[in-house]
Amino acid sequence: MKVIKIDKAKWNDGLEALNGSYSLFGPVKQNECYEFKKLDKDEQLDLSGLNTRMSAKGLIYPHTEAMFTYTLDEGEENHHIMQPADKDYSPRAVIGIRPCDADAFLLVQRNFDTPDYKDPYWIQAYEATTFVGLACNNPCRSCFCTSAGSGPFHEAGLDVLVVDAGDYFLAKAITEKGEALLKVTGWDNELDSDTAEKEIAALKNDAEAKISSTILTDNLKEMPITAVYDAPFWEDVAFACINCGTCTYVCPTCWCFDIQDEVHGTSGTRMRNWDSCMFPLFTLHGSGHNPRGEKVQRVRQRFMHKLKYYVDKYGDGIQCVGCGRCVRACPVNIDIRKVCDLMNNYDEATCAAQ
Amino acid sequence: MVGYIDKIKEISERLLKDGKVDMVIGFRKGTMPMMNEPHRVKSADDVKNLVWDSNCGINLANYLTDRKEKIGIVAKGCDSRNIVTHIIENKIDRDQLYIIGVPCKGMIDSHKITNAVSGEIVDVVESNGEVTVKGDGFEETFNKADVLQKNCAVCIHRNPVIYDELVTDLVEEQADVDRYEDVREIEAMSTEEKHNFFDDLLAPCIRCYACRNACPLCYCPTCFVDESRPQWVGKGDDPVDIKTFHFLRAYHCAGRCTDCGSCERACPVGINMRLLTKKLEMDCLNLYGWEAGLTLDNRPPLDTYKPDDPEEFIK
């Protein structure tokens, strides 16, 4: 695919050129942290942060999303009939998303876009979006993407990969969608692709070498579910957990939601909100019974889902891209890397003998 | 404070060996700079995993709620006050506890340090009242007094109020601290300014409930925001629902809050919701001369009635 060299002085010109054709989203600094935000016309994104505090998940799958609206006023047309909520699926571009976050959408896609079930909101928002990723030259110490199936220069899920090469950027088109976006920018200094790929590969090697944190996942698939489910370490893992939703909300691959109706007077909205398997209400039955009524069951569920059930169901790795957000954000420092080690190293026979 | 750990380990080992307790609740070393993990040790062999330093800000009283075992618990001033509150509110029995009192000199505010340096922090070392922060290409030293959690900076109950054994001599309590400067600043605002201030304060909230769940006071079997039959509060990102949660939670803590700072510390998006409980804490002090968790002999003012309760504020 073609690679374009972008003089840093021309970076903003290209983004401005996108304005007519795309709504732009990108990281901006807010209260000492970087967050994704829809950019106002003259607003500039800030690529100086390591990674955003919240993942890019909410750009496609908002924390709260209206699905339908309705009226109970019998004087109104279509009363008591759900109407699709107003949506804007016009083209948008996310600039400066990190490769792990873009890769995460491919994992999440397995939930929202299946042969049997098509989630119209997620799919339309995803398809309307072009992802322009920024390769990580300096990954965080708590990033473990390379051993979680992703990487600082990982291309899967991206339409364009932008690499900061010092005085200039290199923009590599990965999909046709990405190529189309690059055309609109007006950046036109196309390089010989072999030379450019070599330059990118060298930077990639440097970046990957800086990843200091890794996990091992090689035993997870073969391990019997019941063995690891009944492993003795869960009580210890769960002890500190306060059962807040932080890990699940900052996670780019957690996809669970809860549907709610909110009525004001005679008009109402049916919405969906992020939900969290850490909350007791998540599994509370109408009967009052809760199959995951204890904290340890909920903590185990989160890790078993990411590191075992998902692995077994899809067969190509864990439901985690190694962005490290849950590790950094957990109020009590529960660390998925440690839990993954416990699970991966678990030997039922040895433990039973003890 | 770094030197306390030997004594904590010694006491814990003795308690476990003698069978006086089933577990000791303390901290183990975290995997991130300036983070330790609440941890329970069940055998004398595992006592070696315990740590103590200025990154033990999470309130361990939160881990006692409704437990049935005999428990040794490491308690700094605020933890001990919440243990008192727990005992008064029947969430734990005094006889179940062996309280290892830790006279505290304050906990480090990791957000403050993170924001004060440019670059990712790799290592933080604490010694002699100084905190040295290292990262790629930088090393910076702070006076610990300048990087304390906000509540620790104005704390006047650093010593445990209830304990079975102390790990060291009591420390001098801070005097002449202005505990309510931030509350007065808000009180001085106009109604509209207050409205805007609280809008901005709570705007980043993601409703993860880390503040509530880190709070030893928030032990309701079902929190009002989780009630579904009937449902009291909307679950979405409507600012009114978010404010309802924070304001109501604060009121539920009135007269019980010890200003331990766990809520603010736990917040993944850096909200100082402690300002809300602090105002109520101040009101309880001014109206009733009450500070939570100082004595087992009196119940909090808002769950008792006295004919001579002051009532100027409801006239």
Image (spheres, rainbow, N blue to C red):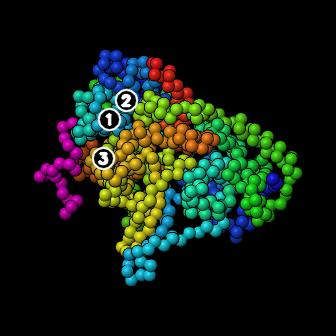
Looking at the image, tell me whether mark 1 or mark 3 is earlier in sequence order.
1
**Tag 2: amino acid:** Ile
| Cβ atoms at labels 2 and 1 below 8 Å apart | yes
Query: x, y (%) of residue B260?
Result: 37, 41
| Of residues A308 and B168, the one drawn nearer to the viewer in this rendering | A308
- Residue with the mark numbered 3: B220
| Of residues B77 and B64, the one drawn nearer to the viewer in this rendering | B64
Query: x, y (%) of residue A21?
Result: 70, 69
- Residue with the mark numbered 2: B25
The residue under the point 44% across, 81% down is A77
Q: Which mark is residue B279?
A: none
Q: Which tag is nearer the camera, tag 2 or tag 3?
A: 3
Query: x, y (%) of residue A48?
Result: 66, 50
Looking at the image, tell me whether mark 2 or mark 3 is earlier in sequence order.
2
**Tag 1: amino acid:** Leu
The residue under the point 64% across, 46% down is A100
Please tell me whether residue A121 is drawn above or below residue B59 in the rendered image. below
User: Distance between the Cα atoms at labels 1 and 3?
Assistant: 14 Å
- Residue with the mark numbered 1: B64
The crowding category of the residue bearing disc 3, from other C-alpha atoms within 10 Å (few below 14, some 14 to 19, many at least 20), is few
